[in-house]
Image (cartoon, rainbow, N blue to C red):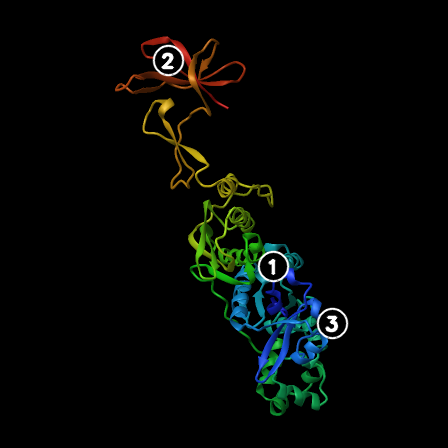
């Protein structure tokens, strides 16, 4: 099952959304002739449309704001959308200049069915401010045809495909103008009329390209597609329509690039541990903002929160003209186990995500953690250190959460639960320690960490309390 995503307004969708109230259009140069390629809703309301000559558009809207079509920017945007689409399928094929194909049969179970997949995909497209037309069919050519024709009703069976193709006008066929003109002059208006012509006669009258395209639509001819392969290293950039004097104007484009990063991480089955945000300026050295995470993550919502926290506190030396994201360190994801008796579990924010946000807001020097010190005495067996990712888990002994600053005499009856743990250390300084430690419990259910001096084994002292 194939899903085609057609982005008919991609050139204009890259324009600044704050200028939606201004009539804007993208112009395509075709030899000496200049025509409208795409326009926003404000220009369309005054009669401007795709294909209109530029001089006629100016006659309708004298204050029309135009920009030339940038083919390289269009290709870069389509690649970013291709990376984003990898979240929904491992088989994604970009069809420049404005379409992406996804094979989604294997994705339906993962997303809970076709309707839920389309709802989620279209919702994320809205968040990226791109208009998209979808087509679903058993063949890639038919899905493409339906998407370009605006026929959004999913076609999932061969019978429905044959019936629906019969109603499509021939103008939507991807044929050259000479062939389409010949079809019209022959009185052919729909694909149903075209399918009635025998293959030999069809090829003789309109060429083999017409026959091939027609039979690829219904699956009689194979149509292999080469899937897009995610690169080993992530780097994507986008030019700003207007200079951004502060980082608040970067939120929309940042979200767009993070969508591409999410698809990249999904395709590679990896998480990001170190991500760089690069801000480019005119005639100034670029600014690099490093985001480091305690654990590798592929959660783009978490990445967006951390990135906006860091950027919100950044003072720019010059306006931003270009934004880029670059992966510096990738790592395998730590996957949480699932409950045997539950089909799904809600994922609460992990402690690592909370700490990442605190570091982003307060700075990496504001948070500390406890690490074991090179001393066996409990009061000296730990030290503070900057919060960093631990390379290996620390095997802590059975120790209380609450260690008293000054031990107190135990004055109630307890029962010793463990064998003695002897600690002898510090003979070289004034705090020489020679103690036997136990875990003790009271009748009320409290647990203490107690010790007795080797020189006085009759008295127990409380050194810590277990939570």
Q: Answer yes or no: do the residues labelled 1 and 2 have beta carbons within 8 Å?
A: no
* Residue 239 horizontal/vertical position (percent): 52, 63
* Residue 59 horizontal/vertical position (percent): 71, 78
Residue 406, placed above or below residue 385 = above
Residue 452's label in the rendered image is 2
Q: Is residue 406 left or right of residue 467?
A: left
Dot 1 or dot 2: first in sequence order is 1
Residue 324, placed above or below residue 49 = above
Q: Residue at x 62, y 59 (%)?
A: 121
Q: Nearer the viewer, mark 2 or mark 3?
A: 3
Q: CA distance from mark 2 to mark 3?
A: 90 Å
Circle 2: is it few (<14), some (14-19), or many (20+) Cα within 10 Å? many
Q: Nearer the viewer, residue 322 or 119?
A: 322
Q: CA distance from mark 1 to mark 2?
A: 66 Å
Q: Nearer the viewer, mark 3 or mark 1?
A: 3
Q: Nearer the viewer, residue 393 or 124?
A: 124
Q: CA distance from mark 3 to mark 1?
A: 26 Å
Q: Nearer the viewer, residue 235 or 456?
A: 235
Circle 3: is it few (<14), some (14-19), or many (20+) Cα within 10 Å? few
* Residue pointed to by mark 1: 128
Q: Nearer the viewer, mark 1 or mark 2?
A: 1
Q: Is residue 284 left or right of residue 87?
A: left
Q: Secondary structure at mark 2?
A: strand
Residue 383, placed above or below residue 227 = above
Q: Secondary structure at mark 3?
A: loop
Q: Secondary structure at mark 1?
A: loop
């Amino acid at each position: 099952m194939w899903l085609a995503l057609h982005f008919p307004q991609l050139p204009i969708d890259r324009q600044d959304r704050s200028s939606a109230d201004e009539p804007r259009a993208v112009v395509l140069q075709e030899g000496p002739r200049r025509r409208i390629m795409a326009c926003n809703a404000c220009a369309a309301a005054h009669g401007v449309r795709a294909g209109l000559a530029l001089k006629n558009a100016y006659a309708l809207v004298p204050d029309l704001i135009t920009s030339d079509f940038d083919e390289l920017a269009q290709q870069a945007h389509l690649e970013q959308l291709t990376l984003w689409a990898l979240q929904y399928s491992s088989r994604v094929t970009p069809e420049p200049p404005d379409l992406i194909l996804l094979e989604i049969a294997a994705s339906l179970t993962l997303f809970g069915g076709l309707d839920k997949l389309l709802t989620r995909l279209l919702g994320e497209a809205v968040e990226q401010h791109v208009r998209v037309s979808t087509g679903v069919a058993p063949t890639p050519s038919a899905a493409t045809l339906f998407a370009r024709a605006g026929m959004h009703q999913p076609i999932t069976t061969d019978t429905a495909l044959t019936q629906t193709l019969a109603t499509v006008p021939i103008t939507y066929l991807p044929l050259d103008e000479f062939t389409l003109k010949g079809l019209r002059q022959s009185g052919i208006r729909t694909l149903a009329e075209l399918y009635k012509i025998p293959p030999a006669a069809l090829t003789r009258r309109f060429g083999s390209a017409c026959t091939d395209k027609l039979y690829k639509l219904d699956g009689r001819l194979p149509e292999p597609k080469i899937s897009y392969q995610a690169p080993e290293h992530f780097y994507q950039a986008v030019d700003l329509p207007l200079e951004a004097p502060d980082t608040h104007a970067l939120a929309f484009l940042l979200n767009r690039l993070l969508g591409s990063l999410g698809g990249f991480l999904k395709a590679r089955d990896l998480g990001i541990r170190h991500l760089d945000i690069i801000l480019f300026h005119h005639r100034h050295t670029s600014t690099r903002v490093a985001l480091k995470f305690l654990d590798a993550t592929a959660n783009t919502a978490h990445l967006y929160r951390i990135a906006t926290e860091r950027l919100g506190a950044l003072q720019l030396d010059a306006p931003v003209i270009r934004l880029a994201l670059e992966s510096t360190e990738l790592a395998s994801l730590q996957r949480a186990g699932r409950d045997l008796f539950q089909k799904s579990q809600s994922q609460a924010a992990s402690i690592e995500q909370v700490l990442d946000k605190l570091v982003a807001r307060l700075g990496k020097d504001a948070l500390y953690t406890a690490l074991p010190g090179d001393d066996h005495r409990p009061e000296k067996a730990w030290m503070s250190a900057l919060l960093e990712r631990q390379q290996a888990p620390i095997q802590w002994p059975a120790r209380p959460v609450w260690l008293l600053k000054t031990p107190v005499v135990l004055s109630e009856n307890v029962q010793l639960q463990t064998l003695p743990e002897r600690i002898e250390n510090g003979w070289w300084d004034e705090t020489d320690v020679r103690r036997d430690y136990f875990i003790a419990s009271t009748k009320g259910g409290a647990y203490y960490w107690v010790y007795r001096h080797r020189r006085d084994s009759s008295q127990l002292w409380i050194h810590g309390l277990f939570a």
